[in-house]
């Protein structure tokens, strides 16, 4: 038990430092939509029912066009959009007026209809400290919640995989994009982290026979499921497709074994309640309502919309890996290509050796994470424009590399090959986190021209600097990545267990067993 807690704390610390680096580096509204979510959080953080259940209204979106949302009674100084620099990457954030309090008044937000669960946690510091300190505290709370889920996912995958490859593959899905969002005020980060935890618990639960020692995974799967269903209106779809990918084909004998466990029944009931409450919120608050744009703003034919969606997939992929700010701070192409080749190679190879069941699961992921968003985007292209971002699909698509890693160490790789691949992830993927932070800091502090040379990328120079200084985020990122690299580099490699031929009997008491260490 002591070793398990220590491993969890070290993994948590690593992720928290990486996320915290972003939390103290970005100006207010540096992460996309942060002002909108901050206003919603400060309103919900008052815990006044009229603010939690804000009346749905038509409000200006981030571009000044009419959109869905609501009004919150919050300090008016929170309404400090990145207007002077947010959509021009050549300008620094020095022109921004900054985050301040001021009198309480009616302030519009496009996040005003979002489920209040996330905002109840991050909102109080923003309500009572509407300044840089309150913003950093709210960001760190978000980062801590994400880090806790990822640390739990890492331990689950390390404990219940043969050689530790799925645990190492966590680096493939805990992308710089997730880290950037986790260092801001945005529920999308927690949604992605919940998706990772969902598959980290679900893969060993659904794809291997029952085992009494896996009962803690039931809790992790339950927590992740509730979060997925609750945080954003797309979450129920991610949950359904994720469950379908893992549970089908059904193994009735295994399901009967698990149904005898009280914890399973309680979590199933909790998930059903969370799903019903989420559905009631979506319907009652009309979170899917779209406001017609000004006439003539977009005039796509169906064929043009389909073609543009297909052609946008390179941008969607780099959006999953990491594009900072308002999708205006991109890395050099080799960073993205290396990530795509490593992760894509793992996914394709697993599809080749995994058999038709693995390919069925891939098809479910493809349908839920590619086809469904495409249908929604194409059908509403003349209402919303093309607003789909790669980060929105991540809560579901993170399951693909984790499943692929699970398949490869069962079907193809031995312990030595798994160790080599895991260390390859460390050497090639972790530096991308540092690179994106540097690019973003340079963009925010001095602007980033398309033809900027190497000498321009000095994260200590510029007209704007975080109130806590530019050294702190760099230091936090370096230390966090070093700890994370050490954890993954030393991920234990074990001797493969014999394949069980019959489901294990769940006869042990319904308590958390002491975790085995490898």
Image (cartoon, grey):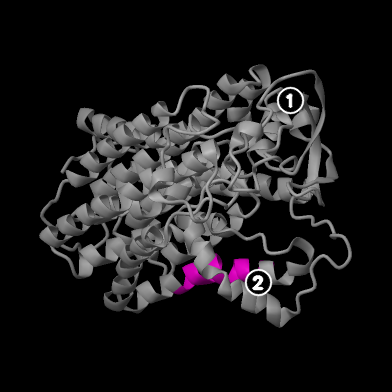
- Magenta region: which residues? 363-376
User: At 52% across and 27% down in the image, what residue appears?
Assistant: 466
Q: Answer with left or right where residue 474 lies relative to residue 501.
A: right
Mark 1 and mark 2 lie on one chain; the one further toward the N terminus is 1
Q: Nearer the viewer, mark 1 or mark 2?
A: 1
Q: Answer with left or right where residue 502 lies relative to residue 365.
A: left
Q: How many neighbours does mark 2 have within 10 angstroms: few (below 14), some (14-19), or many (20 or more)?
A: some
Quadrant containing the N terminus is: top left
Looking at the image, which is closer to me, 314 or 261? 314
In the drawing, what numbered circle is on residue 464? none
Q: Answer with left or right where residue 379 lies relative to residue 406.
A: right
Measured from the top left, where is residue 7 in percent x and y?
25, 34
Looking at the image, which is closer to me, 172 or 497? 172
Which residue bears the numbered disc 1? 77
C-alpha span from label 1 to label 2: 39 Å
By secondary structure, the bulk of the magenta-drawn segment is best described as helix
Measured from the top left, where is residue 155 in percent x and y?
29, 42
Measured from the top left, where is residue 424 in percent x and y?
22, 56
User: At 53% across and 69% down in the image, what residue appears?
Assistant: 313
- Above or below, comparing residue 349 to residue 489 in the picture: below
Measured from the top left, where is residue 14 in percent x and y?
32, 35
- Above or below, comparing residue 338 to residue 477 in the picture: below
Which residue bears the numbered disc 2? 375
User: At 53% across and 38% down in the image, what residue appears?
Assistant: 446
Quadrant containing the C terminus is: top left
């Amino acid at each position: 038990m002591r070793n398990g807690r220590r491993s969890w704390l070290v993994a948590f610390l690593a992720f928290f430092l990486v996320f915290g680096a972003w939390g103290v580096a970005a100006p207010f509204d540096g992460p996309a939509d942060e002002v909108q979510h901050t206003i919603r959080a400060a309103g919900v953080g008052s815990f006044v029912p009229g603010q939690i259940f804000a009346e749905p209204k038509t409000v200006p979106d981030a571009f000044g066009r009419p959109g869905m949302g609501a009004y919150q009674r919050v300090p008016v100084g929170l309404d400090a959009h990145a207007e002077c620099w947010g959509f021009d990457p050549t300008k620094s954030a020095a022109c921004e007026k900054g985050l301040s309090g001021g009198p309480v008044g009616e302030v519009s937000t496009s996040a005003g209809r979002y489920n209040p669960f996330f905002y109840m946690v991050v909102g109080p510091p923003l309500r009572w400290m509407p300044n840089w300190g309150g913003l950093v505290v709210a960001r760190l709370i978000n980062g801590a919640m994400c880090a806790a889920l990822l640390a739990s996912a890492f331990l689950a995958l390390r404990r219940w995989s043969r050689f530790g490859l799925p645990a190492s593959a966590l680096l493939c899905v805990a992308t710089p994009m997730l880290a950037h969002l986790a260092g801001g005020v945005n529920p999308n980060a927690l949604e992605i982290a919940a998706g990772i935890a969902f598959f980290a618990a679900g893969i060993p639960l659904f794809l291997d026979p029952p085992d009494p020692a896996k009962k803690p995974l039931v809790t992790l799967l339950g927590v992740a499921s509730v979060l997925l269903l609750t945080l954003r209106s797309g979450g129920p779809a991610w949950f359904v497709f994720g469950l379908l990918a893992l549970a089908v084909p059904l193994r009735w004998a295994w399901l009967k074994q698990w149904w005898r466990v009280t914890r399973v029944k309680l979590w199933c009931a909790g998930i059903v309640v969370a799903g019903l409450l989420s559905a009631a919120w979506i319907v009652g608050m009309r979170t899917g309502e779209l406001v017609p744009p000004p006439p003539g703003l977009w005039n796509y034919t169906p064929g043009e919309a389909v073609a543009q969606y297909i052609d946008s997939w390179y941008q969607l992929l780099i959006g999953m890996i990491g594009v900072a700010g308002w999708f205006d701070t991109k890395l050099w192409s080799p960073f993205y290509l290396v990530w795509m080749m490593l992760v894509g190679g793992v996914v394709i190879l697993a599809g080749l050796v995994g058999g038709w069941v693995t390919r069925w699961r891939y098809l479910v992921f493809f349908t839920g994470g590619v086809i469904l968003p495409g249908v929604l985007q194409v059908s509403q292209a003349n209402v919303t424009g093309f607003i789909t971002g790669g980060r929105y699909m991540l809560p579901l698509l993170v399951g693909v590399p984790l499943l692929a890693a699970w398949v490869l160490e069962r079907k193809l790789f031995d312990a030595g090959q798994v160790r080599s691949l895991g260390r390859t992830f460390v050497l090639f993927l972790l530096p991308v986190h540092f690179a994106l932070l540097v690019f973003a800091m340079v963009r925010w502090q001095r602007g980033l021209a398309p033809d900027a040379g190497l000498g321009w990328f000095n994260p200590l120079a510029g007209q704007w600097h975080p109130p806590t200084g530019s050294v702190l985020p760099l230091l936090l990122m370096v230390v966090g990545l070093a700890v994370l690299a050490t954890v993954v580099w030393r991920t234990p490699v074990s001797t493969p267990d014999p394949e069980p031929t019959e489901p294990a009997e769940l006869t042990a008491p319904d308590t958390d067993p002491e975790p085995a260490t490898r």
